[in-house]
Image: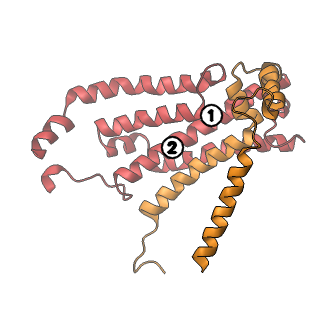
Chain colours: A red, B orange
């Protein structure tokens, strides 16, 4: 029974083709949710989860190794902390221009904008940091849980 | 004895909390302090001060930036904790 399921589900060209077509649109939609969070529901957390869902869809339809070949493990471990770094770094920039921590209006010293628009851009920057961190952490947790931490693909059904 | 003392402290603290519920403003009361000072400020000044039409985003990312920063840190910590539990820490003959 397991052998039949294996042949039917894991080697289905329809599922693989559908996943391959859907993944770019899911990722584009997550970027839309990110950048459109200023004027509609959305933002870094939601966009990051949608982006992570696209990688998880790839892992389900193809294999863990296929995803790790495209989005390597050391890269997504760097992304985990890069997002938090972007967030806190944006906040710390304000300190250098004698503002309060996370006071984005001091970004006017860097970008040519009014203080109001500097806060707008500052929010966009930290939402980007949140997106990167959430996306990488979700993918990392998924890989850890599904491979029990050793990051080796589960054996095929016929090995049992 | 310790358990009895802990039970006494728990019941006392719980009774104090239940007693103080009486002093809370009514649910959705428009005259409560948060609705009179904080909410109108955010609703009225969001576009003027931050240029963002969505008040939720401006509160989340600007007025309450510390909150969101540590939410991101919590997510990062959750990822690191899962890594440590599942692949990092091997208790055995190699660990000291």
Residue B68 image point, x, y percent? 67, 41
Q: Is residue B22 visible?
A: yes
Q: Is residue A115 above or below residue A89?
A: above
Choose top left, top right, bottom left or bottom right for residue B15: bottom right
Numbered circle sitting on residue A128: 1
- Residue beneath label 2, please? A136
Choose top left, top right, bottom left or bottom right for residue A108: top right
Neighbours of disc 2 within 10 Å: few (<14), some (14-19), many (20+): many
Residue drawn at 41 percent across, 33 percent down: A54
Residue A137 image point, x, y percent? 51, 46
Neighbours of disc 1 within 10 Å: few (<14), some (14-19), many (20+): many
Q: Chain of mark 1?
A: A
Count the numbered circles shown: 2
Residue A128 image point, x, y percent? 62, 34
Residue in front for this viewpoint, B75 or B56: B56
Mark 1–mark 2 distance (CA, rounded to whole Å): 12 Å
């Amino acid at each position: 029974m397991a052998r039949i399921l294996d042949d039917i589900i894991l080697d289905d060209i329809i599922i693989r083709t559908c996943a391959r077509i859907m993944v770019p649109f899911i990722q584009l939609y997550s970027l839309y949710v990110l950048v459109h969070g200023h004027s509609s529901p959305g933002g870094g957390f939601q966009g990051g989860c949608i982006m992570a869902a696209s990688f998880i869809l790839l892992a389900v339809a193809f294999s863990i190794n296929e995803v790790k070949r495209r989005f390597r493990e050391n890269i997504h471990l760097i992304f985990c902390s890069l997002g938090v770094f972007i967030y806190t770094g944006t906040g710390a920039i304000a300190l250098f221009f004698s503002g309060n921590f996370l006071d984005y209006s001091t970004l006017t010293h860097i970008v040519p904008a009014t203080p109001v628009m500097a806060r707008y851009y500052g929010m966009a920057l930290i939402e980007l940091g949140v997106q990167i961190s959430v996306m990488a952490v979700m993918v990392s947790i998924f890989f850890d849980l599904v491979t029990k931490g050793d990051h080796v693909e589960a054996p095929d059904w016929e090995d049992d | 004895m310790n358990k009895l003392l802990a039970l006494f402290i728990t019941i006392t603290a719980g009774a104090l909390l239940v007693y103080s519920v009486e002093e809370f403003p009514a649910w959705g009361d428009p005259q409560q302090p948060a609705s009179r000072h904080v909410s109108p400020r955010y609703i009225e000044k969001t576009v003027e001060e931050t240029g963002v039409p969505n008040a939720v985003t401006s509160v989340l990312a600007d007025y309450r930036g510390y909150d969101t920063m540590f939410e991101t840190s919590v997510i990062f910590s959750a990822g690191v904790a899962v890594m440590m539990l599942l692949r990092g820490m091997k208790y055995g003959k190699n660990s000291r």
